Amino acid sequence: MKSIFALTFLAVCSVGAFAQAVKSVPALATSTSAARAEFMNAKYWSKIGGIDDKDHGFTLFSRNLLPNPEGQIELWVKVIPNNFEQFNRRYDLSNDSAFVLQYATVDCTRNFLLLERTAVYDANNNKLNGGSSELTPKSSRDRVKPGSIGGEIFQSICVKLAN
């Protein structure tokens, strides 16, 4: 009986000491900025395409490229311009814009592309206000223009990756 009491006492003291130690450790980084930095980490992104024009070109990276139940492909797309000044002027973005992040749904059989959840970020992964309607089509029925971000996403997913 004494040994059970001793073990119980030891367990209670250990739990108390552990709880005290946890209180003294600073809180873990659980902020949205830490989660955003982890999401933006380059090692989780794959290059899928781009346009090589030094002034008007850009590079596309993807993350979480998965088919949905309707047979469409959903993915996050990161657009990094070759020339920030030209890109920001073309899409009416602020001067400190470094890249655009969009969620895309692509249906290769129906020639369909939907860009949604568009956000603009600076070089420190901070979300910037604004953006332009030029970054997303006005409706899902709009045709994608060759050389546009949407056109290159479609080509990268439905033509280049399919082969």
Image (spheres, rainbow, N blue to C red):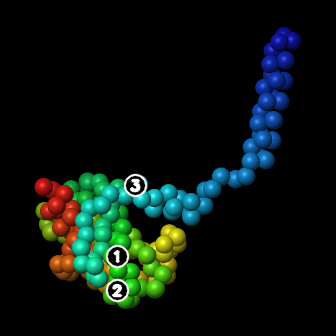
Looking at the rendering, which quadrant does residue 111 occupy?
bottom left
Q: How crowded is mark 1: few (under 14 residues within 10 Å), some or many (20 or more)?
A: many
Q: How crowded is mark 3: few (under 14 residues within 10 Å), some or many (20 or more)?
A: few
Which residue is tagged 2?
Answer: 86
Left or right placement of residue 83 versus residue 41 in this view? left
Residue 137 in the image: state x and y as whole percent.
27, 80
Contact between marks 1 and 3 (CB within 8 A): the answer is: no
Return the residue found at the far top.
Answer: 1
Left or right placement of residue 121 versus residue 3 in this view? left
Residue 136 in the image: state x and y as whole percent.
31, 79
Amino acid type shown at disc 3: Tyr
Which residue is depicted at the point 77% across and 47% down? 23
Looking at the rendering, which quadrant does residue 34 occupy?
bottom right
Contact between marks 2 and 1 (CB within 8 A): the answer is: yes
Q: Which mark is on residue 81? A: 1
Q: Quick one: label 1 or label 3, which is nearer the N terminus?
A: 3
Gap between marks 2 and 1, in whole Å? 9 Å
Amino acid type shown at disc 2: Gln
Q: Quick one: label 2 or label 1, which is nearer the N terminus?
A: 1
79, 130: nearer the viewer: 79
Q: Assign a secondary structure to mark 3.
A: helix
Residue 68 in the image: state x and y as whole percent.
27, 55
Looking at the rendering, which quadrant does residue 88 occupy?
bottom left
Q: Which mark is on residue 44? A: 3
Labels in figure, total: 3
Q: Which quadrant does the C terminus fall into?
A: bottom left
* Residue 107 visible here: no
Residue 54 in the image: state x and y as whole percent.
28, 79
Q: Which mark is on residue 119? A: none
Which residue is depicted at the point 77% across and 33% down? 15
